[in-house]
Amino acid sequence: MPLIEFEEGTSFMHKLDPLSKLGWSFVVLVWLLAMRDPVPVLALGLLVIAVGRLGGGLSAIELLLTTAKLSVIALPIVLIQALLYPGQTALAAGPFGPITREGISFGLAIALRIVGVVAASTIVFKTTDPRDLVYGLHRHLHIPYRFAYIIFAGLRFIPLMQYEAATIREAQTVRGVYLARSPSLLDRLRALPSKPLQWKTFLVMLIANGLRHVPASTIALEVRGFGLHSHRTFYREHRVDRRGPIFALAWLAAMVAYLVLTGTSLMRSVQSTL
Amino acid sequence: MESAAEASSQSSGLGRLGFRPWTTRDLVTIALLIAVGGVFKGYWGGVRLALESSLGPLFTGWIIGAGFSLFGVLPLLIIPKTGVATVSMVAGSVIELAVGNPFGVEVFVFNFWEGLGPDIILALFYLANGGQTPVLGWKFAILAGIASTSLGAPYTLVTRGITALMRNFEGYGQYAVWLFLANRVLGGVICGAAGLALANSLRTMGVIGREEGYRVVTS
Amino acid sequence: MLEAERLSYWFPSRASTPVEPKGMEAPPIERAALKEISVRFQPGEFVLVVGPSGCGKSTFIQALLGVVPALTGGTVAGRVRLDGEEVLARGLAGVAGKVGLVLQDPESQLTNLDVEGEVVFGPENLGLPREEIARRLDWSLTVAGIGPLRNRFVYALSGGQKQRVAIAAGLAMRPRVLLLDSPTSNLDPIGGEETLKAIVDLWRGGAVELIVMAAHKIDDVLPVATRLLVMSEGRIILDGPPESILTQHLLALRDELGIFVPELCELAVLLNAGQGQPINVDGTAAALRERVRVGLALPVEGAASSTPTAARQALPLTGGPPAVEVADLHFAYEPGLPVLNGVSLSIERGQFVALLGQNGTGKTTLAKNIAGLYRPTGGTIRVGGVETTSSATYLRSGKVGYVFQYPDHQFVALTVADELAYGLRARAIPEPEVAKRVALMLELFKLSAHRDAPPYGLSMGEKRRLSVATMLVLRPDVLILDEPTTGQDRHNTVALMEVLRQEARERGMTIIQITHDMEQAAEYADRVMVMDGGRIVFDGTIEALFADAELLEQCHLKPTPTSSVCRLAWPELQMAPATPGRLAQLLPSLTFPLPE
Ligand SMILES: Nc1ncnc2c1ncn2[C@@H]1O[C@H](COP(=O)(O)OP(=O)(O)OP(=O)(O)O)[C@@H](O)[C@H]1O
Ligand SMILES: Nc1ncnc2c1ncn2[C@@H]1O[C@H](COP(=O)(O)OP(=O)(O)OP(=O)(O)O)[C@@H](O)[C@H]1O
Ligand SMILES: [Mg+2]
Ligand SMILES: [Mg+2]
């Protein structure tokens, strides 16, 4: 079970510092949000994938597949925009007014943003060791270590909770909370009203089993001097690579240049969606 | 001991808004709730994909949103300290991304709003209670739920182009927007009710309760 | 160096409206979890703390370093001193770096992502220089024997490895005192052995000055321990050298207090062996040989009479189909990685079967297949002659009950009574019948007093009983229990097993119990099956299993001490008795010539 996205490596993206990479992914997000045409949106998405392939040594196919999974959510957006968007160039008659070229184009632009957004964050987290991220948050964003540590602890507990969730589901199945394997459609429909209660039973027990670990974990932390002193050593070596900020700033500059050159004002872009 | 610390933190401005020092126990609880939330959202993401692919986002947002916002309201019902929800949600999004959340960096944005909303409501409850720890019942839960699902609405309205539909007045554009907003509010109510029901069950079970100081006596 | 003086402690009241007296007045001592404990530990001691479940072992250990009351709240009286310095008054800041603590649950106490991060966590918090941390890291990994695990993520380690990481993490603080709270009771035998070995090595190597360890089963640490504390209801009732306490108070400890005493001690007492000498297999075997040689009858009234001795005959065959019949069962969680490789077995009605085998061989997987939780990839399962693999309603029928290892996972309701009624209501049993059956179960499992309490708040032993009761109330034909007694004291274990045995006898319920506890299997099972590599490799009596040295080796199983002693005493004996009770039964009638 590969829990954490991160994969060891020595690529360019691996060497950059986590905060610069996060900054970069936000630049990508803003850039994508500023654009309203599907073609440049898709182009930027592909460019991001190229960064992942060339700069991070990641598989372009996998990155594309990851984003493709979300088409389930993207398609309805295209559909709604196509049906409802007040465009000029009517292509066909729809139930709520004409279906326009602008509506489809706008819907596609929104949907295709997913490619860049998802690819960028996948690249960041596949090339970033969470330990470096926590360190970066503490050292450079001056987030107190106690808070930055929450991220560690949360990651540590995720596999535990996955195990507990699976076990609780099985145990509750034996208790008769859920239907037998492969029930008929009719059975499933009949069981629909009891669904909320099932989710509640599941969640209550999952949370209770999760919080059961609180006392022992608290003890384990405090006994080892967690939060005792304001000063703390960091044993792990943390490389500082100047290229990180340069990379992020270069992208920022590129975005500004693009927006200026194409005359896309961020404000106008927002207004136009209003 | 505890009451002295409480008294001093109440007098300061931030204390009146419910900002309190966080104990190690609080931090561990938050971490575990994040992990529980992360795993739950994994299951819930499956429900979301199933529902949205069959019924579409405009008709399922009320139930889907409630599931995600739940983890913005629940931490406050367990640890009533302002800031807990925002920190839970933002730290939670880092963790979700690190284990492969399929929605990308936008979860930062969503989670931030979904946590900030309940925190604002909690701060208001503290203020109304003169800086004393308020009793958090259904009023708080529902308001916090609505705040959680609704604070991020403008962002989604704009970036998903739903407001753009507003101009389609001859058509049905405005209905899409109203439907969207109604979804959010209904989702908030459901989220608050669910959060309160969960917290009450956990309290009955003795899993959560008040944290206390100790005292030394001579025997 | 470490001492407690008239230490008393009261947990905060669980009632929502506390009625505790305020101020300096102590609450009544009967309600205290620790009652006026005075004890002094010297450098060089290895102290074992034993006592029945809920006697206050964990509370005591935690009070020794100030976790109680600093993190638990409540009321405390008396003092704890470490090198003359007050511990209780200073909270945890006073002991950080001086006392290491290892807890029972390997999962909760590891709070970092990777092994290295976990071990350096404490020294980092103390703000030590990097070079010093590096030194300590290397040293603690070596001492705990986990050097190769250094760069692994903690979640992917086995239970025993996790506990050793916890030990290393404690050691990295360079504590003078190491406190261990039941460090092996959640582990399987191999994990437990690994952990104990690390502790014993540490002790022998002199890495810490004082070790205090609470435990339920002390067989394996007995040879190194220098002192034994016996606790009961919050008090220390016995304190002294382990072997003399155990041999002098054996029956009282075992039958009245209800704790596990090492089986070897039981034998030694039974045989009146080597007074004052260290208790080991060789000495005990010699004593046994001597006993029988001079023709003395054994003092049967002691150990033998109170050990429940199973009448091992199965129920008279009913002529009906077998209760469980599995044929050529295959199963894989992931394609290409088979876990079950053609399991075949057949179990008669009313049999009590122990399913043994080392970790990861597929015992749980097999049991969950029988329970209908998984869909096999090949083969068939029949319960009471009916094929289950094709029946969608099988799971709901409640024919097969399944008790999970941790009761907490299985609870679904907010009160004990509702918990018991849940399965019945889910199966639409009429309400009067539900009430009747629930009352019966509450009675049988001595849970009546807790009928309206939340299951979650029960003690571990009560939770365990409740989780079994929630299955028995459905009157299943077959009950599967997955390691139902880990971390339980003897009293709870015996009580549970007796109820099960009675159900098997009276209703003909078939029991399949997965266990790593050979003594328990020997005591209660009519028949044992051993799994290895996804197959059943042995099926027969436990005596026959213990006679097959090769198989034991292959499957990492260890015979009971009684079996080992008897084997050593009479190598030519075909089927050595496996429990002290059976040895005692056997001995008077033993007629074959004995070796000289
Ligand atoms: N948080 C708590 N609040 C109230 N009572 C508690 C709490 N924790 C434990 N107790 C009670 O205090 C007593 C001592 O518990 P403790 O955990 O020290 O026992 P133990 O000897 O370690 O048992 P075990 O062998 O099961 O681990 C028990 O009666 C238990 O029910
Ligand atoms: N949910 C799962 N997904 C994938 N593999 C699993 C899963 N559960 C168990 N396994 C694997 O299947 C094998 C058999 O596991 P199982 O739990 O049945 O062993 P076991 O004999 O019960 O061991 P133990 O004594 O440790 O309980 C192991 O290699 C384990 O890693
Ligand atoms: Mg204990
Ligand atoms: Mg198992």
Image (cartoon, coloured by chain):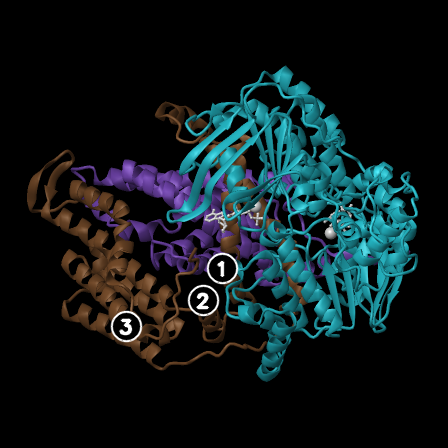
Chain colours: A brown, B purple, C cyan
Does residue C26 appear in the picture of this structure?
Answer: no
Position of residue C49 measured from the top left corner of the image (x, y, whole percent): 81, 56
Q: Which amino acid type is marked by label 3?
A: Gly
Residue C462 appears in which quarter of the rendering?
top right
Viewport quadrant of the N terminus of chain B = bottom right
Q: Report helix, strand or loop for mark 2.
A: helix
Task: Looking at the picture, tell me which residue is in the foreground, C240 or A76.
Answer: C240
The chain ID associated with circle 1 is A
The residues tagged by marks 3 and 1 sit, at their Cα atoms, a distance apart of 26 Å
Left or right side of C1 for B193:
left
Left or right side of C26 for A134:
left
Mark 1: give few (<14), some (14-19) or many (20+) Cα within 10 Å. Answer: many
Q: Which amino acid type is marked by label 1?
A: Leu
Disc 3 target residue: A55
Query: Residue C373's mark?
Result: none
Question: Does the CB distance between marks 3 and 1 fall below 8 Å?
Answer: no
Q: Looking at the image, tell me whether mark 3 or mark 1 is earlier in sequence order.
A: 3
Residue A193 appears in which quarter of the rendering?
top left
The residues tagged by marks 2 and 3 sit, at their Cα atoms, a distance apart of 19 Å
Q: In this rendering, is residue B33 above or below C307?
A: below
Disc 2 target residue: A130
Q: Report helix, strand or loop for mark 1.
A: helix
Task: Looking at the picture, tell me which residue is in the foreground, C61 or C254.
Answer: C254
At 65% from the left edge and 36% from the top edge, which residue is drawn? Answer: C527
